[in-house]
Image (spheres, rainbow, N blue to C red):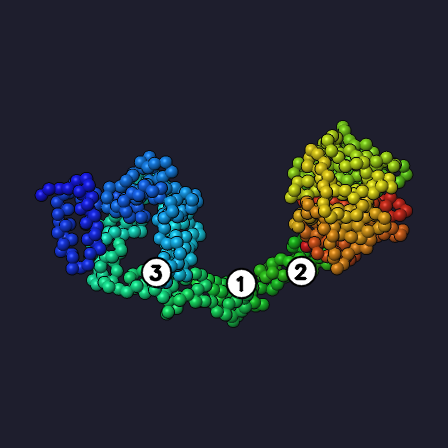
Amino acid sequence: MVCLHGASWLAVSSIRRGCSRFMRRRVVLCAGIALLLSACSPDTSLLDDPNVFLPDDPGAATGDGGSSTRTSGAAPSCRMDTDCKGGERCTRGGCVTICETESDCSRDRFCEAGICRKRQCSANGDCRGGEKCAGGLCVSIGCTPDCSGRSCGSDGCKGFCGHCFDNTFCGPSLSCEVKRNCSDECAEDTSICVDVTAMRRCARGANGCTALGPPETCAAGMECQNNRCTPRDAPDFCVERECGPDGRGGVCGQCPKRMACNGDGRCVDACAGECRLGDQSCDGADRLRVCAGNADGCLIMKSEPCPPGTTCAGNQCVNNCTPESDGDICARLGRNCGPVTANDNCGASRTANCGNCNWMERTSSASPTVRAYPGMAYDSRRQRIVLFGGTNGMGGYFDDTLEWDGNNWTRRTPSASPTVRAYPGMVYDSQRQRMVLFGGRDDGVQFGDTWEWDGNNWMQRTPSASPSKRGGHSMAYDSRRQRVVLFGGRDGGVQFGDTWEWDGNNWMQRTPSASPSKRGDHAMAYDSRRQRVVLFGGYGNSDLGDTWEWDGDNWTLRTPLTSPSRRRDHAMAYDSRRQRIVLFGGWDGSGDYLADTWEWDGINWTLRTPSSSPSRRGRHAMAYDSQRQRVVLFGGHDGSNFLGDTWEWDGGP
């Protein structure tokens, strides 16, 4: 017998492949060809080699700029990337073109998961009944690709979630994993007809390499067609179906979540009478019905037993015990005012009333002297309230620096310090961990200098640009944008309505399309939850009671249903635990000093009514101690006297 080699062998091997598609009456002829080929053992081994690469698109290498492939069963056209030309990779024995967009492929191919694949269709009319054209492939109507949690492998609709290149393979987790000493591979989860009666399956071994297994004989009444065992002469049921069996051992398509396949092969809504997540109710004394999803993605009520030692009451499982009182809960949590929500000793969520919240006066062995208009802010790194300057109204202006730790005031003695002044703007830059002070005035002399406090010394900064000299302005620190924001103020009788920002090196004037009117003696604080600087009141041509917010680009006038009365010389601070801006006191311009406490939640102002409170005053200073969760107030003026008392507000929960 003469064995065939080279081109002759390829021709005969093509005949052998054709035999796998012959009808049963041609089995004898195919068997004869197979016997002829089996005598040439050196060459026929290539056909049965489990490591032969099998490209996606059968056919000889095209050389047209698309995916170069080879005849199925022939020797692989490449074994590594260097066997291919530039812009191609060796994948499953064939050189394929790498692509990023459709334009990287030839006209009859499309880009999918990084490689050029042969286009099956350009429009729905190119596909058979029950299919549609999607991304160059004919897929069953109703099929929804799903690549969640995977980077390679099938998307369930004849497409791919990605391809693995170089020395990697698509692992069980559907992500690319490193192969271990693999040579040639076949496509995992595919099969190849050996003849009409049998096929070989491709599977991945423990070393991460794929190989064709031994021939498997199709079951009785089945034959190998299209590389799988299917019923003889089985009709294709997918012409008018979008789901369910196709009659050939496969399915016409998968229904999406919350849809089910009915008897007519159509996807219909599988959910009815849904509940809402979080719904629950008692199902007797010891069971709880909760709303949860089932395998179809529908929400249904499921009955579950309560844990041992509990019973169902009030639509929840609670311990069989005597609940503690509100007073016990407040004492356990160390709360002395306001409502507090917590689990009681029986595990049930309760809101306990701990009494009216109050301002609490604090006393210290050392305290700043009486004064008004000091600068004050909280150093979150060192957990200290820092106070600078102020005036006692008798020609006395201060340049002292004091710190409050929650128990005592401590006088600091830096080697350098700003000059004596009142009415400065002062905030803490949490990103640069510096206290920033700008301007102020000393008995009619206005300042326009910038200083920073690092906890040991004051350092004067000399920016190339700066706001003009002024006092009575207000400042707040925008922690999201890491900028100190300054608005308004006055120089003698001249009012300002400008907006400036300090980035740690220079002041930059902003020019928003909308802005508050010119004013001084207003108050500002930064709402970190809503990322807005909030401004209230002040004095322009008259006393003001408007609320404005700065988002970094523009000022917006807010119109709450309730609001504090018109005023100036009040103070504000942001309570970050309770996410409220707290305002206290001020002067209404008619000679009356105020002692009211208001809170802004971003929508409305709410008047609080504590049983104890600081006395009426204006020109005081406030800052929020985030470590102790207290708003701290110091000093001010009540119309007759300058004050030097310290108060704290916890506001409740």
- Report how far apart the C-alphas of labels 3 and 1 lie in the structure: 42 Å
Q: Is residue 520 above or below residue 358?
A: above
Q: Which residue is mark 1?
A: 277
Query: Seen from this angle, which residue lies furthest top?
Result: 415
- Report how far apart the C-alphas of labels 2 and 1 lie in the structure: 27 Å
Residue type marked 2:
Ala
Quarter of the image where one finds residue 249: bottom left
Could you say which is closer to the camera, residue 337 or residue 521? Answer: 521
Q: Which residue is mark 3?
A: 128
- Identify the residue at horizontal 65%, vertical 54% (top origin): 333
Q: Is residue 144 above or below residue 386?
A: below
The nearer-to-camera label among 2 and 3 is 3
Q: Which residue is mark 2?
A: 352
Could you say which is closer to the camera, residue 619 or residue 266? Answer: 266
Q: Position of residue 367 (x, y in %)?
A: 80, 40
- Identify the residue at horizontal 66%, vertical 50% (top origin): 530
Q: Are marks 2 and 3 in contact (CB under 8 Å)?
A: no
The nearer-to-camera label among 3 and 1 is 3
- Report how far apart the C-alphas of labels 2 and 3 lie in the structure: 69 Å
Q: Circle 2: is it few (<14), some (14-19), or many (20+) Cα within 10 Å?
A: many
Residue type marked 1:
Leu
Residue 571 shown left or right of residue 23 in the figure: right
Could you say which is closer to the camera, residue 653 or residue 57? Answer: 57
